[in-house]
Image (cartoon, grey):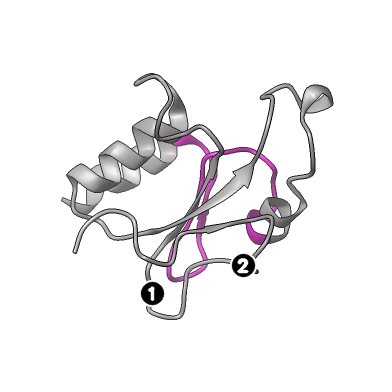
Amino acid sequence: MSGQTEQETQAQGADAGAGADAGGIPTLYVCHGDDQGPRVHPCKRVQDALREAGIEYTRVTGGHGHPISFLRRGSRERVRQATGDVKLPALVLADGTVLTHSKEILRWVAAQG
């Protein structure tokens, strides 16, 4: 199975956990409009790369609203608890390693092939 798992959650609502799930599947924290956004959007680029590489992951919507923090509704506190930062996208690997920049995540994806 490739791409997003059935365990997709939203950080506001069901408990998103703090890292990779028990099965060792990485957890990807993204913003709310990631998959429908433009191809250049970092959250979309990361998800496209994970799917193309056949890497299974759990997606957590960790941000809602505006990319400028003072215009954003709600909090990214759960993202901070899981990753140590509020920046999206962020990928938490099975060993607990956190990748917090799209370029870093894309390098990791490329190294898996």
Where residue 56 sits: x, y (%)?
A: 29, 60
Q: In the rendered view, tell whether residue 75 sits above or below residue 70.
A: below
- Give the distance between the C-alpha atoms of the residues marked 2 and 1, in whole angstroms: 13 Å
Q: Is residue 38 left or right of residue 11?
A: left
Residue type highlighted by circle 1: Gly
Image quadrant holding the N terminus, namely bottom left
Q: Which image quadrant is residue 93 in?
A: bottom left
> Which residue lies at the image location 27% right of the left edge and 39% below the top edge?
49
Q: Which image quadrant for residue 2?
A: bottom left
Name of the residue lying farthest toward the left: 113
Q: How many tags in the picture?
A: 2
Please name the residue that numbered disc 2 is placed on. 18
Q: Is residue 68 left or right of residue 26?
A: right
Specify whether residue 5 is painted magenta.
no
> Of callouts 2 and 1, which one flags the residue occurring earlier in the amino acid sequence?
2
Q: Position of residue 45 (x, y in %)?
A: 35, 31
Identify whether 47 is placed above or below 40: below
| Residue position marked by numbered label 1 in the rendering | 24
> At 51% from the left edge and 32% from the top edge, which residue is drawn?
33
Q: Is residue 45 above or below residue 100?
A: above
Indicate the quadrant where residue 71 lies. Answer: top right
Badge 1 density bin: few <14, some 14–19, many ≥20, Cα 10 Å: some
Q: At which x and y percent is residue 103? A: 41, 32
Q: Secondary structure at mark 1?
A: loop
Task: Write the start and end of the magenta stretch as one range.
Answer: 82-102
- Secondary structure mostly seen in the magenta stretch: loop
